């Protein structure tokens, strides 16, 4: 019975995965238009960000759509098909779970965000003109 359930979900993923990718491709969000100097500041910030993902993961698709909507240039790595990226995710973040945003700062410190909601909140809180009614910017606890 377990084997049957396992194959059922593999079949379901095999059918729905390409449909989700098609939907993502056909309905791209409109990106933010910024002045060139402001976009350069955003690009400088995103240079230290890397998104580890699986191509057909619905949570990864959600994060990629926000990245497109915010016009961010964030490096993406496929942790499913690229063994090097998968190993980096395991060693750096401690577990192979996606989406995962690697945030490296100027001092060499690295943080790993694993939940799509946390990733989206982080991006919207740190990028100018990124407020979204669905995800208000992160606020300071206790304020």
Image (cartoon, rainbow, N blue to C red):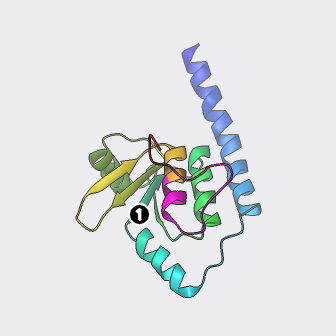
Query: Residue 9: horizontal and vertical position, in percent?
Result: 62, 30
Main SS type for the magenta part?
Answer: loop
For the question of whether residue 112 can be seen, the reply is yes
Tell me if 18 is positioned left or right of 51 in this view.
right
Instruction: Name the residue at the bottom extreme.
Output: 36
Residue 71, quarter of the rendered image? bottom right
Outermost residue on the top side: it is 1
Residue 57 in view here: no
Residue 16, compared with residue 124, is above or below; it is above
Q: Dot 1: within a 10 Å radius of its alpha carbon, few (fewer than 14), some, or many (20 or more) residues? A: many
Front residue of 129 and 53: 129
Figure label count: 1
What residue would you read off at disc 1?
49
Q: Residue furthest front?
A: 143
- Residue 123 included in the magenta stretch of the image: yes
Residue at image point 60% right, 33% down? 10
In this rendering, the answer to whether 10 lies above or below 117 is above
Q: Residue at x 65, y 64 (%)?
A: 69
Query: Of helix, strand and loop, which one carries label 1?
Result: strand
Q: Point out the image quarter for the N terminus.
A: top right
**Bounds of the magenta span?**
122-134
Coordinates of residue 26 in the picture (x, y in percent):
76, 62
Residue drawn at (58%, 58%) of the image: 64
> Image quarter for residue 82?
bottom left
Q: Position of residue 38 (x, y in %)?
A: 53, 81
Is residue 77 rendered magenta in the image?
Answer: no
Which x, y percent locates residue 53?
Answer: 49, 52
């Amino acid at each position: 019975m377990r084997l049957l359930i396992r194959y059922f979900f593999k079949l379901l993923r095999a059918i729905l995965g390409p449909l989700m990718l098609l939907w993502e491709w056909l309905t791209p969000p409109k990106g933010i238009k910024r002045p060139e100097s402001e976009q350069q500041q955003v690009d400088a910030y995103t240079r230290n960000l890397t998104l580890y993902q699986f191509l057909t993961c619905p949570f990864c698709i959600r994060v990629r759509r926000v990245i497109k909507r915010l016009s961010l240039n964030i490096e993406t790595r496929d942790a499913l098909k690229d063994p090097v990226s998968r190993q980096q995710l395991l060693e750096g973040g401690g577990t192979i779970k996606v989406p995962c945003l690697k945030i490296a700062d100027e001092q060499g410190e690295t943080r790993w965000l694993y939940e799509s909601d946390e990733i989206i909140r982080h991006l919207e809180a740190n990028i100018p003109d990124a407020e979204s009614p669905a995800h208000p910017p992160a606020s300071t606890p206790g304020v």
